[in-house]
Image (cartoon, grey):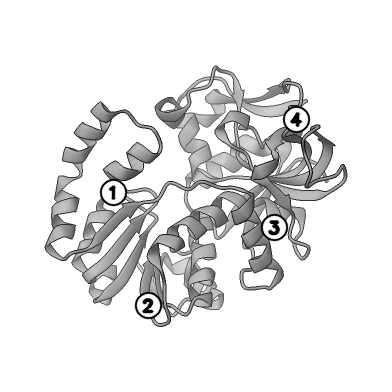
Amino acid sequence: MKALCLKSYAKDLQKSLEIKDHKLEPLKGDEVLIDIYVAGLNPVDYKIVHGAARLFNNPPKPFPIGFDLSGKIAAVGSEVKGFEVGDEVYAKLPWSHVGSVAEQAKCPEDMCSLKPKNTTYIEAAGLPLVACTVIDSFNIMKIKKDTKILIHAGAGGIGTFAIQYAKHLGATVYTTCSTSKVEFLNQLGADYVIDYTTDDYKKSLSEIDIVYDTLGGKFTKEATQFVKKGGQIISIVGYYDNATLKEIGINPVIRFFNYFRGLPLLNACSKKNIFYKHVWSFPNQMKLNETRKLIEKEVIKPTTDSVFEFENSIAALEYVATNRAKGKVLIEIHK
């Protein structure tokens, strides 16, 4: 079968990636084989090409890339109870099975779920990692009615899902974006949309209960300026707190030096009793089932920016890396 494979770590995606033949290992008892109809892309995919894989898994090259997919079950392992051949599914592949930008993939049964009935394959493929990340993040936040939350980069995959979910939970939603995306986010339901190209977003905010940090860098530290005392900063890209690094198996030496790197942020949080947490998502079937219910009840509507052909997979990933998308970027494998 064909798959988009990483040949070498580099910033130049054209030189690092290639669509080539890739052989799957025999199906295990607890796995399903999926004919992939659509692959969903995430920022982590191009970050892996840039070298992030070396920090966590570092599989032997060449290896296929991509985690999100939708498709049909082509075969089931001897221990699989919840799926049959022909079932329409969506899934988030674990690191051990990475490779959704491909014609087929193996997936553990507990990382796969039936596709929401009211979605296309294109819409469903954009959901798994985004949905599970937001669910894990919001489980920490404990959002209540009228909670004031800032969701950075509201037009991205995470942002579009998080805005809708936060509104469902009763929050007052603030978000940031560029001028061309303001109307899009107003229509999505955000209460206050801040155009960062014309306004200093920090001056538009005060006494925010929660900041959902999807940008990292200076934005993580800046959040301490307008989060209220006793508030929260929940990040998916900012400084990794020690508890999170321990949870994902990073060795104590790295955790020790990382602690000192984060002291300026931690000290700023301490002064205002702000709770800080980096969320590392652990997708599973339970969260995918929860997402399916949210979609089928139309609490969340998937947002699609663009769909690329399989042969244009590298261009699709380059587009994701521009951070210009409004919603998800997908690759259609089988029409």
Residue 316 position in % (x across, y down): 61, 42
Q: Are marks 3 and 2 in contact (CB under 8 Å)?
A: no
The residue indicated by pointer 2 is: 147
| Number of disc labels | 4
Mark 3 and mark 4 lie on one chain; the one further toward the N terminus is: 4
- Vertical side of 112 occupied by 185: above or below: below
Alpha carbon distance from label 4 to label 1: 43 Å
Query: In the rendered structure, which amino acid carries the disc numbered 3?
Result: Glu
Residue 267 position in % (x across, y down): 13, 53
Q: Counting other residues with Cα less than 10 Å from the Cα at mark 3, is it few (<14), some (14-19), or many (20 or more)?
A: many
Alpha carbon distance from label 1 to label 3: 30 Å
Q: Are marks 1 and 2 in contact (CB under 8 Å)?
A: no
Alpha carbon distance from label 4 to label 2: 45 Å
The residue indicated by pointer 1 is: 217
The residue indicated by pointer 4 is: 29
Name the residue: 19% across, 52% down: 265
